[in-house]
Amino acid sequence: MSGPEQKRLLTDLSRAELADWCGSIGEAPFRADQIRRWIFGKRVTDFEQMHDLSKPLRTALANSFRLFASEIVRHQVASDRTEKLLLRLEDGSHIECVLMREPDRRTVCLSTQVGCAMGCVFCASGLLGLKRNLSTGEILEQVLRLDRLMAADERITNVVVMGIGEPLANLKALLPAMEVLNAKGGLGLGARRITISTVGLPEKIRELARYGKPFNLAVSLHAPNDELRNQLVPVNARIGMAAILEATDDYFLVTGRRVTFEYVLLGGLNDTVDHARELAAVLEGRG
């Protein structure tokens, strides 16, 4: 007997996998495009709302899949209309995602992991270490949740992957999610409207470059030298800034996209004039 625990999260399926599923139940493969338009373009929350699909197809979808696997346990709205969701996943884990409003932008910020293994001393996300990677569907579900908070005349214009977790440590799930956000049959965002943030994993930066999409890359540097960065970003001790900067140079050569370097000012730790001068020297000609 089937139950909710056996239903797949629909956003875990690629377009090709969804088309194959449609074929397996006697439906034309183009139905996959119709289904995806409802999910990513029309903000439905239930299969029954997909009214241009036959009743048998809607029933089959409901019997086989879920649109959402998370539960919203906290919804916060700031004075500038920024909205943050705390989501409880099926295994009881929690992640956060954020909708940020600017006059000409609607940007969503996504998580890629439950917890984080990077150990940055100023970040609460990794206090309990890494629990697991999110699936492609769990990454996309954050987009759907945030998209459904917006008014009818609002649209997501930008995506930043800067939430909980190290995005490049979960490229296997992240890249298919970004493909959906980029695709016309998905959210239809240009690759240059998608920014992926990392503490700096050189081989993963090169893997992202080889993927062939000019996503924006942001590197959380936070220090101008290895000695200080090892204290603030412990994973740097086994990588080193030189390797990270070489990888970002390669990223620019392959994609043509300049890399953004992020720097959190921490009073008394990395905020002196000497630090600024050293950082300027390190990044000269980059960024």
Image (cartoon, helix red, strand yellow):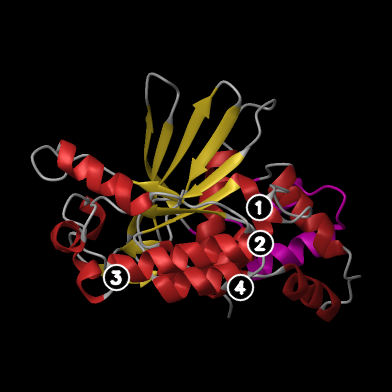
Reply yes or no: does residue 212 show up in magenta: no
Q: For the residues carrying marks 1 and 3, which lies nearer the camera in this image?
A: 1
Answer above or below: position of 187 versus 5.
Answer: above
Whole-percent x and y of residue 177?
A: 59, 62
Helix, strand or loop at disc 1?
A: helix
Question: Amino acid type of disc 2?
Answer: Lys
Callout 1 touching callout 2 (CB < 8 Å): yes
Mark 4 Cα within 10 Å, few/some/many (few <14, many 20+)?
Answer: few
Q: Residue at x 39, y 49 (%)?
A: 284
Callout 1 touching callout 3 (CB < 8 Å): no
Question: Amino acid type of disc 4?
Answer: Arg
Q: Is residue 71 visible?
A: yes
Magenta highlight range: 45-69
N-term-proximal mark, 1 vs 2: 1
* Residue pointed to by mark 1: 191
Question: Amino acid type of disc 3?
Answer: Lys
Give the position of the N terminus as an image quadrant. bottom right
* Residue pointed to by mark 4: 210
Q: Residue at x 62, y 26 (%)?
A: 151
